[in-house]
Image (tube, grey):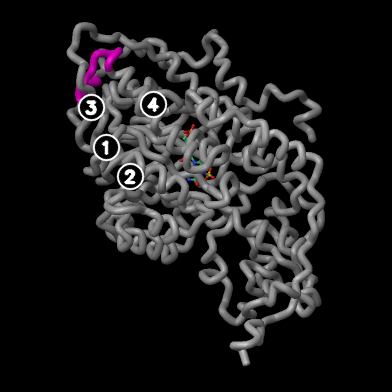
C-alpha cells in the first residue's frame, strides 16, 4: 500500500546503475530518473559530461547550469522514468580536494561584509572564495581581455567640470527607464549561470533589485528558470528580458510572448554575440572537466576549446540581421531594445527600424576584444543624435566596467538614460549572498548622492555634457596611474605556474 511504503513504484539505485554506458544511459536529476541514451549526441555540452554520471545521481553537476524545467521542456516524456528511492542510491563520497579544503579555509577567514567599501572589494573577495570555474566564468573576458580592462579604465579618461554654489541640500537620484520609476539610474544586467556563484542563482538578484527599486534584466541563459525569476519578484517590481535569438524562431516567439504574458516590461535583443567570445580563463578551468567537449560529440580527443560558454550557447542564431527586426516588432508589444550596439551608424539604423532603444555595450569585454567601451561609444553617439534632433527618439543605455557612481554620472551627463551593471552584483552575490547585493546597491546610492552634490546637480536632469571634459575619451593607450583596485582583483597577478594549475 503506497501509504505505508512511499517508495512503491520508485526505481532503485541498483536498477539505474545498470544503465551506465553509451548504449544505455540513465541519470538521476532532482530524485527522478531519465533515459538520456538518445540525447547523448545532441547534448550541447557533449556526451562525456553526461557519461561521467551514467547510472548515477547527476544533480550536483546539473543544477548550476540548467534551469530546473529543462528536462520537462526538452526531453521527450517517454524518457522520463519516474521517481527514485534515493535511500537505495549509493551517494559517492567525494573526497574533498586539497583546493576545496584551501577554499573552505579562505572562506573562514574572509573579510566581513562591512569591510567592503566599494564594488571592487566584492570582486577581490569573490576571487578568493569562489570555486575556480565560477570565478573563471564570471571574471573572464575575450582573448587578451583588453576591452574588459578598457571598459573600466575608459571612465578614468573622462574628467568632471563641477559647478559650485548650487543648492544641493536635497538631491534626487531617481529617474525613469522605459517609463518605470527607479531609485537610481542603474539596472542589473543579464549575466548567465547565476547558480555557478550562488546556489539560489538569479533570484538573489531579483530580491536585491526589489529592495533597491531597480530593474533586473532576466538572462536567457539563467540557471533559474524564467518563471522562477518572475515568480520571485514582489509587488509591482519591474523586470526586463535579455534574449538570445534561437535559430528556431518558434522557440523564440514562445519565449517572447510568454515573457510579455508574465508582465516583463522590456525585450533586450543581444546583437553582439552571433557566437560567444573565446574566454580563456573559462576554458582553462574547464580543462579538467569533460563537460567542455562541445566540438566533437563522438571521439575521445576532447577539444576543450570553448569552456562553459559554448556549451550553453550553440542554439544562438548567427544569421540574425536587421531584416528580422520587423518580425520582432510584430510578435510583441513590449518595448524592444538592441543590446550590444557599438557604433553610431547602427544607432541611426536602430532608430530607423523603430526599436525603442539600444544598449551601447561590448558584452563586458567577453566578445570582440579591442572593441571600444560603452562610455566611449556614447561620447561618439550623443553629439550626432543631438545634431540631428534625434536624441529623444530612443532610450540609450550603456554597460561595461561601471564600478563607481561617478561612472554612472558620466554616462548620464553624456545623455544615457541609465547604465547596466553585471559582474559586481555577481561577485557580491557569490561572496555574501543577498546581503552582499544589498550592500553593493546601497554603496552605489550613497556614492551617487555624494557625487551629485560634488558635481553640483540636485537631480539627474541637471546632469549635462558641459559638466565633463571628454577630450581624452578616444585615447586608447595612455599612461595612466595603475588602477590598483582593479589590478588586485585581476587574475594577471597570479604567477604563471599557478595559471597552469
Ligand atoms: C559577466 C557576465 C556578463 C554577461 C554574461 C555572463 C557573465 C558572467 N552573459 S554570457 O554568459 O552570455 O556572456 C551574458 C548573456 O547571457 N547575455 C547577454 O546579453 N550579456 C551577457 N553578459 C554581458 C552583460 O550583460 C553586460 O554587458 C556586462 O556584464 C557589463 O559589464 P560588467 O560586467 O563590467 O558590468
Residue 424 at x, y percent in the picture: 49, 33
Image mark for residue 377 = 4
Helix, strand or loop under label 4: helix
Q: Nearer the viewer, mark 1 or mark 3?
A: 3
- Residue 258 located left or right of residue 86: left
- Percent x, y of residue 108: 67, 35
Mark 2 Cα shell of 10 Å, populated few (<14), some (14-19), many (≥20): many
Q: Position of residue 321 (x, y in %)?
A: 41, 48
Instruction: Point out the tag, 3 or 2, that comes first from the N-terminus.
Output: 3
Q: Report the residue marked by disc 3.
A: 172
The part of the chain drawn in magenta is 453-463
Magenta-span inclusion, residue 210: no
Q: CA distance from mark 3 to mark 4?
A: 27 Å
Q: Earlier in the sequence, mark 3 or mark 4?
A: 3
Q: Residue at x 80, y 45 (%)?
A: 97
Label 1, label 3: how many angstroms apart (C-alpha)?
20 Å
Dot 4: within a 10 Å radius of its alpha carbon, few (fewer than 14), some, or many (20 or more) residues?
Answer: many
Residue matched to label 1: 395
Q: Which mark is residue 337?
A: 2
State left or right for residue 432 relative to residue 215. Answer: right
Q: In this image, 193 relative to 174: left or right? A: right
* Cβ of mark 1 under 8 A from ligand 1: no
SS category of the residue bearing label 2: strand
Position above or below: 489 against 190: above
Which residue: 67% across, 41% down?
131
Amino acid at each position: 500500500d503506497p501509504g505505508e511504503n512511499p517508495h512503491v513504484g520508485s526505481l532503485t539505485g541498483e536498477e539505474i546503475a545498470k544503465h551506465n554506458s553509451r548504449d544505455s544511459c540513465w541519470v538521476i536529476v532532482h530524485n527522478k530518473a531519465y533515459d538520456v541514451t538518445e540525447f547523448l549526441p545532441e547534448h550541447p555540452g557533449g556526451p562525456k559530461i553526461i557519461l561521467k554520471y551514467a547510472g548515477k545521481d547527476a544533480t550536483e553537476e546539473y543544477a548550476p547550469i540548467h534551469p530546473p524545467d529543462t528536462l520537462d521542456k526538452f526531453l521527450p516524456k517517454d524518457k522520463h522514468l519516474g521517481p527514485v528511492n534515493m535511500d537505495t542510491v549509493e551517494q559517492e563520497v567525494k573526497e574533498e580536494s586539497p583546493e576545496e579544503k584551501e577554499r573552505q579555509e579562505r572562506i573562514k577567514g574572509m573579510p566581513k561584509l562591512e569591510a567592503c567599501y566599494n564594488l571592487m572589494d566584492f570582486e577581490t573577495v569573490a576571487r578568493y572564495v569562489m570555486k575556480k570555474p565560477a570565478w573563471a566564468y564570471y571574471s573572464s573576458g575575450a582573448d587578451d581581455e583588453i576591452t574588459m580592462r578598457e571598459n573600466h579604465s575608459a571612465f578614468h579618461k573622462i574628467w568632471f567640470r563641477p559647478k559650485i554654489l548650487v543648492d544641493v541640500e536635497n538631491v534626487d537620484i531617481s529617474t525613469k527607464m522605459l517609463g518605470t520609476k527607479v531609485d537610481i539610474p542603474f539596472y542589473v544586467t543579464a549575466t548567465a549561470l547565476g547558480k555557478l556563484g550562488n546556489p539560489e542563482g538569479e533570484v538573489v538578484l531579483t530580491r536585491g533589485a526589489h529592495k533597491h527599486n531597480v530593474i533586473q534584466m532576466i538572462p536567457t541563459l539563467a540557471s533559474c528558470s524564467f518563471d522562477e525569476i518572475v515568480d520571485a519578484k514582489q509587488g509591482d517590481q519591474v523586470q526586463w528580458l535579455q534574449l538570445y535569438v534561437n535559430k528556431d524562431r518558434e522557440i523564440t516567439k514562445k519565449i517572447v510572448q510568454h515573457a510579455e504574458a508574465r508582465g516583463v516590461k522590456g525585450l533586450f535583443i543581444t546583437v553582439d554575440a552571433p557566437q560567444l567570445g573565446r574566454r580563456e580563463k573559462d576554458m582553462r578551468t574547464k580543462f579538467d572537466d569533460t563537460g567542455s567537449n562541445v566540438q566533437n560529440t563522438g571521439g575521445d580527443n576532447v577539444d576543450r576549446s570553448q569552456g562553459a560558454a559554448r556549451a550553453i550557447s550553440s542554439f544562438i542564431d548567427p544569421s540574425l540581421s536587421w531584416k528580422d527586426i520587423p518580425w520582432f516588432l510584430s510578435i510583441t508589444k513590449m518595448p524592444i531594445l538592441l543590446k550590444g550596439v557599438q557604433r553610431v551608424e547602427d544607432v541611426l539604423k536602430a532608430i530607423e527600424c523603430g526599436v525603442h532603444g539600444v544598449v551601447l555595450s561590448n558584452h563586458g569585454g567577453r566578445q570582440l576584444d579591442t572593441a571600444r567601451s560603452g562610455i566611449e561609444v556614447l561620447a561618439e553617439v550623443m553629439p550626432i543624435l543631438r545634431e540631428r534632433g534625434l536624441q529623444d527618439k530612443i532610450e540609450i543605455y550603456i554597460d561595461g566596467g561601471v564600478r563607481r557612481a561617478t561612472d554612472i554620472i558620466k554616462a548620464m551627463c553624456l545623455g544615457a538614460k541609465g547604465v547596466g551593471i553585471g559582474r559586481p552584483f555577481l561577485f557580491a552575490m557569490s561572496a555574501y549572498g543577498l546581503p552582499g547585493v544589498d550592500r553593493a546597491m546601497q554603496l552605489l546610492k550613497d556614492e551617487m548622492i555624494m557625487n551629485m552634490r560634488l558635481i553640483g546637480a540636485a537631480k539627474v536632469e541637471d546632469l549635462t555634457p558641459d559638466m565633463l571634459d571628454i577630450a581624452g575619451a578616444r585615447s586608447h593607450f595612455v599612461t595612466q596611474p595603475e588602477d590598483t583596485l582593479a589590478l588586485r582583483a585581476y587574475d594577471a597577478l597570479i604567477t604563471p605556474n599557478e595559471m597552469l594549475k
